[in-house]
């Protein structure tokens, strides 16, 4: 029963999150903003449209969005939603989780390269550059959790992160991991300090440029996959930030949904407060975040 | 008590990273001042027999490191109208990486040291060595003389943390003497900086590399 609820949440909730982020940004900027459900409307509209396929593209171009959504969905199955355990869990699923996200990224980049456009190639190069700097931060965080819990599976690892032998070193390490994962969340989802999801026509953009040639259902899949990715990484981070449980399944789901909403609003606030970083500053910050996550591990291992 | 101390030391270590990654002089002086104040109150966590000696030392250190020296440095910065380090010998990312390596090495090395039992579990020794290394990196890789003074300050902070180990054994006057030395050193550096400024119209120590008749 719980698993059914979790999978339903997983399928239907993610498109709500970009709507919440955009609404928050609009309200802070003093605008009214699009409806919170805008992405659902967009998805419905895009499903009815025809796809335009360039004659230079091959099957990879269409496989990109499909594999991305499938990989993100599979990765989401390993992440516990709030206090509920993940639908699927086995020893070592941490590695599979991280590399499913890697596979999604690879296919997005491959589809962008498949168009043969220099502009999209540039976007793909930037995306993988930033991703290979953000991935160590994610991994160091996972290593810290593995070390604290002695587990190699996401669900038990994140079951109650703050309870594993409280000490200042462990608490500080967890806080650093949470901060590092928030940055990873912003980078991987192309949020503002690192990338601007609104700029379709700027040379500085990263992720948006890779999907310029996709249209119709393929574009819908990409938008859905992006919101799914936010949901996955958000759920991971929320286990650290909101380690509460209410005792019953309904309450746990409510806490999870509430905290996920709060996370989307927080992201919107961060986006409103900050300007986009210069492109050269992004790798610097990502390396710093990776080093700080490594420092968290050192604090534990000593 | 030791747990609170460890938490403070974690903050000190994080400030080291901030310092290595930042190019803004004002930010660095502020962080150094804050680090100094944090350090100043650490003796209270170790030594709690309620004597006025430790409290007086803490207040004195906080005043010198948190107010006096930063105000001198900020003034030197204003006089020279420099705001940031633009072109260090080793870039910010590599110096951050060096700092992280140094911190890891310090943690590993501290495990090998034959410390007295009450100090073995704490972060005191690793934090001291890591702060020391951070100061050393700042001193050797930055071009601007004011930056190097900040590096010197961090170096001294590292030594201060190490001194916490010996708090019971060290007489009050020695500690005050160290503090006075530090203050005089910064004071003299301020004067030297002014002379460099007047002679070369910049703080870049690059100009000091060649001799002239």
Image: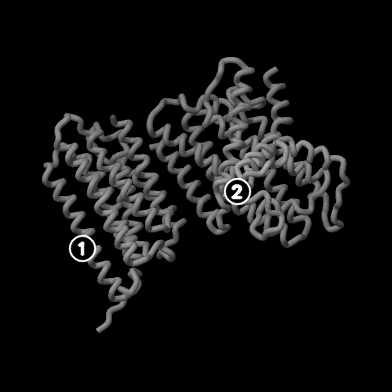
**In the picture provided, is B157 more to the left or to the right than B19?**
left
Q: Nearer the viewer, residue A91 or B1?
A: B1
Q: Report the front residue among B178 and A125.
A: B178
Q: Nearer the viewer, residue B68 or B31?
A: B68
At horizontal 44% and vertical 39% (from top left) the residue drawn is: A296
Query: Which residue shows up at 80% across the image and 45% down it?
Result: A218
Where residue B155 sits in the image (x, y, percent)?
Answer: 28, 53
Residue position marked by numbered label 1 in the rendering = B188
The quarter of the rendered structure image containing the C terminus of chain A is top left
Q: Which residue is mark 2?
A: A192
Above or below — where is A297 with respect to A161? Answer: below
- Confirm or deny contact between disc 1 and disc 2 (CB under 8 A): no
Which residue is at the front of the view, A277 or B14? A277
Protein image colouring: one colour
Q: Position of residue B68 (x, y in %)?
A: 24, 52
Q: Which chain's residue wears label 1?
A: B
Residue B143 falls in which quadrant of the image? bottom left
Dividing the picture into quarters, in which one does residue B186 lie?
Answer: bottom left
């Amino acid at each position: 029963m719980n698993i059914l609820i979790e999978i339903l949440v997983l399928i239907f909730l993610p498109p709500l999150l970009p709507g919440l982020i955009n609404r928050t940004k609009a309200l802070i900027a003093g605008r009214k903003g699009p409806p919170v459900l805008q992405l659902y409307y967009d998805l419905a509209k895009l499903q009815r449209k025809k796809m335009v396929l360039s004659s230079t593209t091959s099957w990879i171009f269409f496989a990109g969005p499909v594999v991305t959504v499938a990989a993100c969905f599979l990765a989401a199955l390993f992440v516990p939603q709030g206090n509920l355990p993940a639908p699927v869990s086995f020893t070592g699923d941490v590695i599979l989780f991280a590399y499913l996200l890697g596979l999604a990224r690879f296919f997005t980049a491959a589809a962008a390269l498949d168009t043969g456009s220099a502009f999209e190639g540039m976007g793909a190069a930037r995306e993988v550059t930033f991703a290979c700097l953000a991935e160590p931060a994610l991994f160091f965080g996972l290593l810290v959790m593995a070390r604290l819990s002695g587990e190699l599976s996401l669900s038990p690892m994140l079951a109650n992160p703050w309870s594993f032998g409280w000490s200042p070193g462990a608490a500080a390490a967890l806080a650093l991991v949470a901060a590092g994962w928030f940055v990873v969340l912003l980078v991987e989802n192309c949020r503002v300090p690192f990338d601007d999801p609104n700029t379709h026509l700027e040379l500085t953009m990263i992720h948006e440029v890779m999907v310029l040639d996709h249209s119709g259902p393929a574009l819908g899949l990409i938008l859905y996959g992006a919101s799914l990715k936010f949901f996955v990484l958000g759920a991971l981070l929320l286990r650290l930030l909101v380690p509460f449980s209410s005792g019953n399944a309904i309450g746990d789901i409510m806490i999870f949904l509430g905290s996920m909403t709060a996370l989307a609003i927080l992201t919107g606030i961060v986006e409103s407060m900050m300007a986009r970083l210069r492109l050269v500053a992004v790798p610097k910050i990502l390396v710093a975040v990776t080093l700080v996550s490594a420092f968290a591990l050192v604090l534990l291992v000593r | 008590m030791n747990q609170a101390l460890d938490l403070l030391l974690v903050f000190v270590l994080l400030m080291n990273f901030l310092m290595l990654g930042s190019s803004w002089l004002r930010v660095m002086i502020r962080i150094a001042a804050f680090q100094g104040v944090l350090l100043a109150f650490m003796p209270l966590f170790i030594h709690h027999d309620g004597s006025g000696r430790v409290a007086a030392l803490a207040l004195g250190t906080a005043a010198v490191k948190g107010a006096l020296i930063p105000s001198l440095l900020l003034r030197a910065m204003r006089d020279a109208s420099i705001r940031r380090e633009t072109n260090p010998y080793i870039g910010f990312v590599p110096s951050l990486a060096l700092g992280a390596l140094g911190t890891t090495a310090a943690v590993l090395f501290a495990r090998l040291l034959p410390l007295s039992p009450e100090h073995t579990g704490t972060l005191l020794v690793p934090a001291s060595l890591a702060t020391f290394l951070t100061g050393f990196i700042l001193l050797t890789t930055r071009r601007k003389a004011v930056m190097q003074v900040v590096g010197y300050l961090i170096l001294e902070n590292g030594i201060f943390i190490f001194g916490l180990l010996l708090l019971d054994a060290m007489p009050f006057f020695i500690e005050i003497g160290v503090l006075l030395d530090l203050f005089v050193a910064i004071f003299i550096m301020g004067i030297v900086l002014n002379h460099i400024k007047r002679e070369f119209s910049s703080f870049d120590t690059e100009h000091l590399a060649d001799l002239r008749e």
